[in-house]
Image (spheres, rainbow, N blue to C red):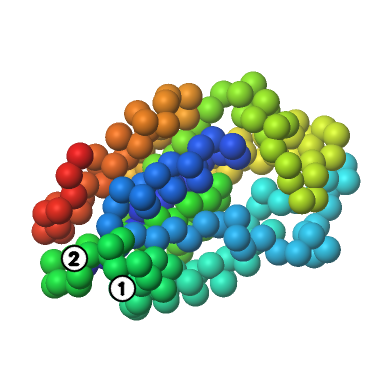
Amino acid sequence: MKTLIVGVGGMTNGGKSTLSKSLKEKIPNSCIIAQDSFFKDDSVVPVDSNGFKQYDTLDALHMDIMMSEVDAWQRDPETIVKNIDPAPEKTIPSSPDDVFVLIVEGFLIFNHRALNELMDKRYFLEIPYDTCKERRSLRVYKPPDPPGYFDGHVWPMYLKNRQEIEGTATGILFLDGLKSKEDLLATVYQDVCVEMKRLKYSDCKL
């Protein structure tokens, strides 16, 4: 049994979740761990001098719990996959050459050094400011974004976090999030397949 960890990162509303779910549908023996599942309770997230909750930082996330889930997958990926997708038709019978794929998805996955170092493939989705702001305005958040939150916190933190990974993370393939979902999926899926085949996985076909 072999393992492969694929990181799908990028800005808010850039298409990370859509791409990750599409990858999972196409790749046998795969599962997703999403960073958004590990936000701390709103009551403990700090507030800046402008009154904005500091959600776009690693301190707002239970990264220790997320890392524990990644570790559990590394120790026994087959069991994790079977627990998520128990239907036998979705899981290929285990063999020594099987590749189990973990898709780690989130907006700060490459900013967490220990998590980033575990990844074999890294993809970062980007979209322009105007598109990002428009998409964000159409989403419903709990708690909801207060007036001015995007320009006062979300976008400045994106720029800060983006600059940080340029200096600390390597091997990231930056993708144009304005491309069609089909094109983005084809690009990433083909690249992942090459790596899976390198690991002696022969059943991944475009």
Along the polypeptide, which appears first: circle 2 or circle 1? 1
Q: How many marks?
A: 2
Dot 1 corresponds to which residue?
Answer: 78
As helix, strand or loop, the secondary structure at mark 2 comes to loop
Q: Is residue 199 above or below residue 53?
A: below
The label shown at residue 202 is none
Q: Identify which residue is drawn at 43% across, 68% down.
A: 84
**Viewer can see residue 170:** no
Q: Choose between 73 and 173: the one closer to the eye.
A: 73
Residue 155, image quadrant = top right
Dot 2 corresponds to which residue?
Answer: 98
Horizontal side of 15 relative to 147 (left or right) equals left
**Viewer can see residue 55:** yes
Q: Contact (CB < 8 A) between labels 2 and 1?
A: yes
Q: CA distance from mark 2 to mark 1?
A: 10 Å
As helix, strand or loop, the secondary structure at mark 1 comes to helix
Q: Choose between 173 and 42: the one closer to the eye.
A: 42
Quarter in which the N terminus is drawn:
bottom left
Q: Is residue 189 above or below residue 87?
A: above
**Residue type at numbered disc 1:** Glu
